[in-house]
Amino acid sequence: MSSSDFRQIAIRTEAGKAERLFRAAVSAFCSLTRPSRREIAQLEDLTLPLFDEVSVESRRYVAAALSECDYAPTALVRRLAEEPVEIAAPLLARSDALSDIDLIALIGRHGLPHARAIARRKELNPTIADLIRALERPTLVKTRPPETVTRLAPKPEPIAKADADRPAPGEATENARRRLRSMMRPTGDTADINTFLGQPAYVKLRETALTGNAAFFQTALADALEIDFATARSVTAQSSYAALLAALRALDLSEDRAFLIAVAVYPGEFPHPQAIRLFLDRYRLLHREAALDKVRAWKAEALSRAIRGNAADAVDMESREASNGDGASAGLKAS
């Protein structure tokens, strides 16, 4: 079918023909060897207004057709990718019109069903593959098995021996914290926060964020930034991701890693691609030194709270001692 045939289909707008027009326009478009930008725009202008009027079967047909198309219209593909996985699967698994950022956003909004379809892509970004594996196995915080379960296991000796050589999670965390403290700068500028943010720290942030348990992630963030838990909790308890943005920038994470964590902690903040683009723009424009200053301010505020709390406790103790002394003196006088 020629491009002129496609243009003729695009012009037909008779009432009651939405279903047939939707299918025919996409079929004609897919037959074009190298469609022009104008023809791509024409297809979007024609099909997107009809989208809500056509059946699920037509959407499934169009998604399958466009998944094999080298020049599929991005807006239409993105709209179809938001459909249930029964419709969107061919596009999720094959379409080049979906960028890595699109795929991460779709996983953040639709979860495991879309993630499993995306996992079938031939050349998948390793970061996205890691995210999908994490969703498949959500309990990534390793704990030792209960003693009763160990006793009931058929052959517990090899496992028990392997576990005995491995430090307990709490002990490993404390050891890591001690090593990090030893690396803290005594003088000068030698101790930027990223000097102790290795791969394990990022993995811990990512995995705890994907558990959906806020306390797990807040603990990991407190460890990574060397801040107290209350400050880490206040960073993620805000209605927007502004504070978390500064925390991730201070840790010098790459854009894709920072976004992956942000969308796991604040999934409702990314309802459309424009919100994702806004996050990435803000992340790029935020100078790392400004983010580090923000973290230092959090630490100073935490220290100030601790000092004020200790001072208040001391005053309270003195007042109690004074009142006890006055009471004892009054008792002696009465006697």
Image: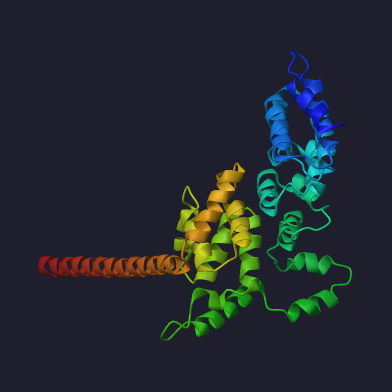
Residue situated in front as seen by the camera: 255 or 220 = 255
The residue lying at 48 percent from left, 52 percent from top is 237
Q: Left or right of 308: which side holds 54?
A: right
The reply to whether residue 68 is in sight is yes
Residue situated in front as seen by the camera: 97 or 131 = 97
Q: Residue furthest top?
A: 15
For the image shown, how many numbered marks are present on the structure?
0
Image: 26 above or below 271: above
Query: Residue 162's x, y, as percent?
Result: 79, 78
Residue situated in front as seen by the camera: 330 or 87 = 87
Q: Quadrant of the C terminus?
A: bottom left
Image: 66 above or below 230: above
Q: How is the image coloured?
A: rainbow
Q: Residue furthest left?
A: 333
The residue lying at 50 percent from left, 81 percent from top is 181
Q: Left or right of 295: which side holds 263?
A: right
Query: Residue 116's x, y, as percent?
Result: 79, 49
Q: Quadrant of the N terminus?
A: top right
Query: Residue 325's x, y, as percent?
Result: 19, 70
Query: Residue 35's x, y, as percent?
Result: 78, 39
Image: 227 above or below 192: above
Q: Left or right of 64: which side holds 125?
A: left
Which quadrant would residue 199 be assigned to in this image?
Answer: bottom right
The reply to whether residue 56 is in sight is no
